[in-house]
Image (tube, rainbow, N blue to C red):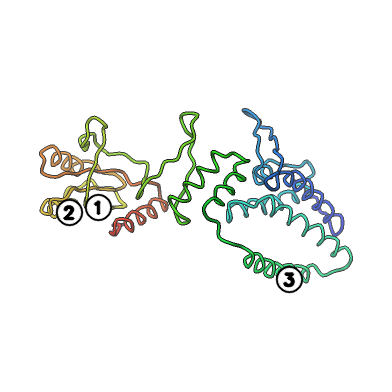
Amino acid sequence: MAKQIIYSEGARHALLRGVNQLADAVKVTLGPKGRNVVLDKKFGSPTITKDGVSVAKEIDLKDPVENLGARMAREVASKTSDIAGDGTTTATVLAQAIIREGSKNVAAGANPMALKRGIDKAVETVVAAIKAMSRPVSGNMVAQVGIISANSDQTIGTIIAQAMEKVGKDGVITVEEAKTMETSLDVVEGMQFDRGYLSPYFVTDPERMEAVLENAVVLIHEKKISNLKDLLPVLEKVAHSGQPLLVIAEDLEGEALATLVVNKLRGTLKVAAVKAPGFGDRRKAMLEDIAILTGGRAIT
């Protein structure tokens, strides 16, 4: 495929036109009084949003050089979203101003690298000034920030504030689609992952079909367990201690699983086994998290 080559002022102007088209569409969403944008979808209903990065991701221009400029501005919004989680519209507006004024200076004969070094120094000064002006957000202020972010929705803003108060700044907050029209807050103490018991024989509460173990010994193993010999030393030690046993592994099958089920049915050992959460490197990291939480060490 043939390539189009553009130099100097022509290239800068085309890139700037692309940046301007994207930034002008995004910046209408800026701030608490920002406007909504309607995004057309090839399939399904249109999306109504005032999230800057969502608008930026939908923009694709016909002119290939202008589209390069739009993609540059889109990258600013995406990186800001990944790092900070918010402020994408502000970042896009700042990028537009930097590129526009930078182009003017380069056209007037300024050295682009000298300009870049000047911008870097200015960023350091501005960031330091903003940090000095900043103040911690607490109490009702969290709810106010949440309400603004939720497009002035009082209910969602209040729930966000309650969640922040419950888990603290180091806690994890996730948003899931409800099966009903009601918006609710569910606080989970400790750790939760989406896996169930490997056999219904591990159930301790038949009415609720739950396996509940209290003060259990936890075996965390990254690999599959199928050989009884691998499991036997652990079973003997746990049986002597009288504590329940929870096995978390990639999988449990064959005679290893059968032995746990038999011991559970006989009442020799209160036990349950679940598959480890995640896949690949993600699984390894999650098992290490479980080990830290339980005060143990993952066997790999």
Task: Kindly state the secondary structure of the residue where label 2 is placed.
Answer: helix
Task: Kindly state the secondary structure of the residue where label 1 is placed.
Answer: strand
Q: Is residue 50 above or below residue 138?
A: above
Q: Label 3, label 1: how many angstroms apart (C-alpha)?
A: 54 Å
**Residue holding disc 1:** 219
Task: Answer few, some or many: residues within 10 Å of disc 3's Cα (few below 14, many 20 plus, some between 14 and 19).
Answer: few
Disc 3 marks a residue whose amino acid type is Arg
Q: Is residue 236 above or below residue 44?
A: below
Asked whether, in this view, residue 34 is left or right of residue 270, the answer is: right
**Residue holding disc 2:** 234
Task: Kindly state the secondary structure of the residue where label 3 is placed.
Answer: helix
Determine whether label 2 and label 1 are within 8 Å by CB: yes
Give the tally of numbered discs.
3
Q: Residue 20 placed where, x, y %?
A: 79, 49
Q: Identify which residue is drawn at 51% across, 45% down.
A: 160
Considering depth in this image, is 131 or 5 the residue closer to the camera? 131
Determine whether label 2 and label 3 are within 8 Å by CB: no
Q: Is residue 299 above or below residue 173?
A: below
Disc 2 marks a residue whose amino acid type is Val
Considering depth in this image, is 159 or 110 the residue closer to the camera? 159
Task: Answer few, some or many: residues within 10 Å of disc 2's Cα (few below 14, many 20 plus, some between 14 and 19).
Answer: few
Residue 117: image tag: 3
